[in-house]
Amino acid sequence: MRVVGLMSGTSMDGVDAALLETDGERILGFGNAYFVDYAPGEREALVAAQGQWPGESNALAATAEIVERRHIEAVQALPGAELVGFHGQTLAHDPGRARTHQLGDGAALAATLGVPVVWDFRSADMAAGGQGAPLAPFFHHACARWAGLDEPVAFLNLGGVGNVTWVDPTVARPEAPGALVAFDTGPANALIDDFMQERTGVPQDRSGGAAIWGMRGGDRALFDDPYFDLAPPKSLDRNAFRPVAQAARGMETRDGAAFLTAFTIHSVQAAQRHLPEPPARWLVCGGGRRNATMMAWLGTALVGEVDPVEAVGLDGDMLEAQAFAYLAARVMAGLPTSAPMTTGCAAPVCGGRVSYPG
């Protein structure tokens, strides 16, 4: 199938769209990709909606229209899709109470685009006792096998929230025992982006230019958060670690950026203890891999080589969009999209709802 996958992550900068050729098991080819920016007013609406659940605000319908319109625009830029994988915009995620909220209606996309749309990927997993996240690990497994890797490797996604997937590519099926371990590590760019937006009006520390000059001080007790000791599977909401964000607000800009970057590094370093064995290599995707300061500090904090995923021929900007194309194909084929060691579900789950045009 030729499938377009869509992702609007917790950084809320825009919509990634990527075309993937797959049978739901193998990666058969990578197609074109496209990115649609959220305009400043649109991003502000998404930021204001963070933490809201369905029915809590009359403004959610207008915000959903923004999400759907931008996703439709992204798909239309990549003609030839037979299927679409639509994640939606996460507003809230509460695995402790088995609920999650991704804004956007897949049926509305299907009606406009004229092709089937797979969406609502997380609910079935949570109904089966899972965390509903992370969902990219099955695709990471396929990527490792596509790249011909033959020893354990870790995919580290540094988007708004960080997550890691430990992959043994010698295990043929992603749902099989020993193939995968995955979980959210902690904040990645979300706290830094929010802090820099507040201080400079630009929602990022470009290439770590502020952090590299800052002092990595702050309240070290915050680094002892019990989340880091919690055994996986485990997942986080974007707004977790609010005390850390609050602590940064009392610092100079470069010191706050350094503190928040160091906190992200610490969260990834703490994740190492939960992996079955040290990976030979860490392959970093998401916006964090473009932060030279973050990458340098990761290189000294982790056991194993640290590289951007481009080192094995993958596109770190589009990996999550490609993941939802792959998961959509798996849903159509009736294959699992999550497993006990990726989300904590009781047994492998095929998650996702399918909406057909008309």
Image (cartoon, grey):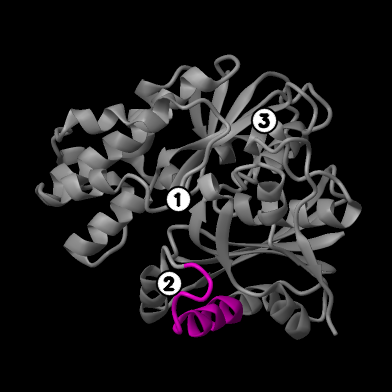
Element on which disc 2 rests: helix
Nearer to us in this view, 137 or 152: 137
Nearer to us in this view, 108 or 346: 346
Q: CA distance from mark 3 to mark 2?
A: 31 Å
- Residue at the spot of label 1: 237
Q: Principal SS element in the magenta part?
A: helix
- Residue at the spot of label 3: 341
Location of the N terminus by quadrant is bottom right
Horizontal side, residue 12 vs residue 71: left or right: left
Mark 2 residue type: Leu
Write down the quadrant of residue 215 in the picture: top left
Q: Is residue 308 above or below residue 202?
A: above
Query: Which residue: 15% across, 52% down?
Result: 249
Nearer to us in this view, 162 or 170: 162
Mark 1 residue type: Asp
- Residue at the spot of label 2: 46
N-term mark: 1 or 3? 1
Q: Residues within 10 Å of mark 1 (few under 14, many from 20)?
A: many
Residue 156 appears in view: no
Q: Is residue 37 above or below residue 4?
A: below
Horizontal side, residue 107 vs residue 67: left or right: right
N-term mark: 2 or 1? 2
Confirm whether the magenta stretch covers residue 59.
yes
Nearer to us in this view, 80 or 23: 23
Give, as a single range, the part of the protein colored magenta: 53-70
